[in-house]
Structures are given as C-alpha cells and as structure tokens.
Image (tube, rainbow, N blue to C red):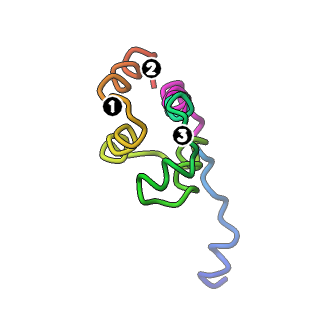
Amino acid sequence: MGLAAYHLTVCPMPRSSRSPRQARLQELLVVGRTAAGLSQEEVARRLRRPQSFVSKYESGERRLDVVELIEIAEAIGFDACKLVADLAGSGQS
C-alpha cells in the first residue's frame, strides 16, 4: 500500500467539542456586534478581512488568538479586557 493510499484510509481525529468558555466567547462576540448595529460584512471591512472570517469565528469553526480578539474588540467597539474577565468568570474550559 503506497503512502497516498494510507492517507486515504486513516480516520481523521474527531473535532474537539466546544467548551463552555468557547461557546460564551462566540455568544459575546455576536451580541457585541449586533448591539453595535454592525453586520458581519461591516466588521470584516473594518478588519480588512473577508466576511467568512467573521462568520467562522462566530460559529466556532475558527478560533482566535489574543491579537485577533483585540482587533475584533476595537472594530466592534468593546473592551477586550472586560470580555476576557467575563470569560474567566464563566467556568472551566
């Protein structure tokens, strides 16, 4: 069996389930955006990213790093430190 055939028969690793904190982060980002009266397209424009970037982090398909979270907070107009404090108090990951 060649290497290419081997890769086709290997089962993919299961995607990790969404933690309570990840779910809360997604919720806070969507609520923050909608409370600011912004569409995904407008946030994406402010970030100079495609709309799919916003869709993916809001749906949990994509995770964010700290720098991205700060940039999103600035684009939406909320305090990233308060968001992180909220997440820290929302239970175990």
Q: Locate residue 76, reporting x and y percent.
A: 43, 38
N-terminal of the pair, mark 1 or mark 2, is 1
Name the residue tied to disc 2: 92
Query: What's the magenta bit mostly, secondary-structure-wise?
Result: helix
Question: What is the crowding at mark 3: few (fewer than 14 residues within 10 Å), some, or many (at least 20)?
Answer: some
Name the residue tied to disc 3: 38
Name the residue tied to disc 1: 80
N-terminal of the pair, mark 3 or mark 1, is 3
N-terminal of the pair, mark 2 or mark 3, is 3
Q: Amino acid at mark 1?
A: Ala
Where, quadrant-wise, is the C terminus in this rendering? top left
Q: CA distance from mark 3 to mark 1?
A: 17 Å
Task: Tell me: 32 left or right of 8.
Answer: left
Q: Which of the two marks, 1 or 2, is nearer to us in this view?
A: 1
Q: CA distance from mark 1 to mark 2?
A: 19 Å
Q: Which residues are magenta?
A: 16-28
Question: What is the crowding at mark 1: few (fewer than 14 residues within 10 Å), some, or many (at least 20)?
Answer: some
Q: CA distance from mark 2 to mark 3?
A: 30 Å
Magenta-span inclusion, residue 58:
no
Residue ID at (61%, 42%):
59
